[in-house]
Image (cartoon, helix red, strand yellow):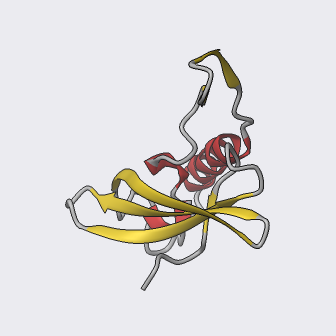
């Protein structure tokens, strides 16, 4: 495996891990009903790396993104089996959308997508 590939993959993994494990902090301001948080709970950056990249150094030696994600939006939420579950519309850069499920123990941070989108 090429050292540039390894370095880039390590950087991508570290950045992703920092994002999905980052605690979400409450903001000071509130209207008395809703509590706002500093970071959105689910974004395009939360999509797993193996959805966006071919992680095989033979077939993708420059570790180029193969499937761009434009946005994650319009999520529906439910608490299911003691986990907060979001079903979100995921939009690719080609503007085609699909649905995917993400779960968290807290409901405000650490959301992880399931390995596969809804089929």
What residue is at 65 percent from the left and 51 percent from the top? 13
- Depth check: give the residue in front, 85 or 12: 85
Q: Position of residue 67 (x, y in %)?
A: 35, 63
Q: In the figure, 62 relative to 25: above or below?
A: below
What residue is at 31 percent from the left and 59 percent from the top? 91
What residue is at 47 percent from the left and 76 percent from the top? 117
Work out which quarter of the rendered image holds the C terminus and state it.
bottom left
- Residue 101 sits in which quadrant? bottom right
Q: Position of residue 20 (x, y in %)?
A: 67, 47
Q: Is residue 96 left or right of residue 33?
A: left
Q: Is residue 103 left or right of residue 106?
A: left
What residue is at 44 percent from the left and 49 percent from the top? 44
Q: Is residue 62 left or right of residue 91?
A: right
Q: In the figure, 21 relative to 119: above or below?
A: above
Q: Position of residue 73 (x, y in %)?
A: 38, 52
Q: Is residue 99 left or right of residue 17?
A: left
Question: Which residue sits furthest top?
Answer: 28
- Residue 66 sits in which quadrant? bottom left
């Amino acid at each position: 495996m090429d050292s540039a590939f390894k370095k880039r993959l390590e950087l991508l993994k570290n950045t992703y891990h920092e994002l999905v494990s980052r605690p979400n902090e409450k903001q000071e301001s509130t209207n008395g009903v809703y509590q706002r948080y500093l970071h959105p709970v689910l974004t395009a950056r939360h999509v797993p790396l193996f959805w966006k990249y071919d992680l095989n150094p033979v077939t993708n030696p420059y570790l180029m993104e193969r499937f761009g994600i434009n946005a994650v939006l319009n999520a529906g939420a439910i608490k299911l089996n003691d986990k907060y579950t979001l079903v979100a519309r995921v939009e690719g850069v080609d503007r085609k959308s699909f649905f995917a499920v993400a779960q968290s123990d807290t409901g405000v941070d650490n959301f992880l997508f399931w390995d596969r989108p809804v089929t």
